[in-house]
Amino acid sequence: MTNERNNENQQTNNSIADSVKNTAGSAFETVHNALEATENVAMKAVDATSNAVNSVTGNNNDRDNQE
């Protein structure tokens, strides 16, 4: 009887541990995806800024060449 109860407790503990592990894995995956999304937005902003600077610089160069 005691051995049977110990086995049931062991199975319950393993189930709880697996549940915690899976929850933590899901949480880390969510954070990782959020960081990737943030990085993508930031890089698009950098690209847009770079394009704007190139456009202004190109316009200035064109004006300099016309003078």
Image (cartoon, grey):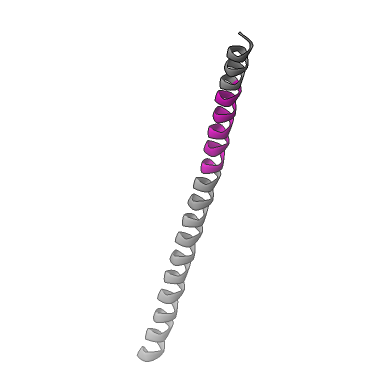
Relative side of 43 to 62, left or right: left
Residue 20 image position (x, y, % from top left): 44, 64
Quadrant showing the C terminus: top right
Quadrant showing the N terminus: bottom left
- The question of residue 43 being in magenta is answered with yes
Residue 18 image position (x, y, % from top left): 46, 71
Q: Is residue 6 above or below residue 56?
A: below
Instruction: Tell me the quarter of the picture where residue 63 sits.
Output: top right
Q: Residue at x 58, y 15 (%)?
A: 60
- The question of residue 48 being in magenta is answered with yes
Residue 47 image position (x, y, % from top left): 57, 34
Q: Is residue 55 above or below residue 28?
A: above
Seen from the viewer's position, the closer of residues 14 and 4 is: 14
Overall secondary structure of the magenta stretch?
Answer: helix
Q: Is residue 64 above or below residue 48?
A: above
Q: Is residue 19 above or below residue 35?
A: below
Relative side of 3 to 15, left or right: left
Instruction: Tell me the quarter of the picture where residue 37 sits.
Output: top right
Total labels drawn: 0
Which residues lie in the magenta part?
A: 38-55
Seen from the viewer's position, the closer of residues 62 and 33 is: 62
Instruction: Tell me the quarter of the picture where residue 41 sits.
Output: top right
Relative side of 47 to 4, left or right: right
Residue 2 image position (x, y, % from top left): 35, 89
